[in-house]
């Protein structure tokens, strides 16, 4: 999330944040931690 916010701070004329961040999980919560994959989304819209 920090990398997303940093990029947006360096490109203020391109996008604006439109909502709260979201955590995206792609594997079962019952699987081992070492095999889980996830990501973060930050909703934006063009200026």
Image: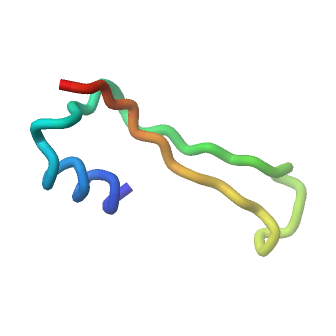
Residue 45, picture quadrant: top left
The reply, left or right, for residue 34 in relation to residue 11 is: right
Q: Position of residue 31 (x, y in %)?
A: 89, 61
- Does residue 9 appear left or right of residue 21 in this picture? left
Residue drawn at the location 26% of the way across and 32% of the way down = 17
Front residue of 40/13: it is 13
x and y, in percent, of residue 24 in the image: 62, 43
Instruction: State whether residue 15 is above or below residue 40.
Output: above
Residue 46 picture quarter: top left
Looking at the rendered image, the quarter that the C terminus falls into is top left
Residue 33 picture location, percent across and down: 77, 69
Q: Is residue 13 left or right of residue 17?
A: left
Q: Nearer the viewer, residue 17 or 23?
A: 17
Instruction: Name which residue lies at 75% across and 48% down.
Output: 26
- Observer-nearest of 21 and 12: 12
Where, quadrant-wise, is the N terminus in this rendering?
bottom left
Q: Residue at x 22, y 48 (%)?
A: 8
Residue 10 placement, left or right of 29: left
Residue lying farthest to the bottom in this orientation = 34
């Amino acid at each position: 999330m920090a990398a997303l916010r940093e990029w947006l701070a360096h490109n203020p004329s391109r996008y604006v944040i439109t909502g709260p961040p979201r955590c995206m999980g792609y594997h079962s919560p019952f699987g081992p931690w070492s095999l889980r994959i996830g990501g973060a989304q930050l909703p934006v819209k063009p200026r």
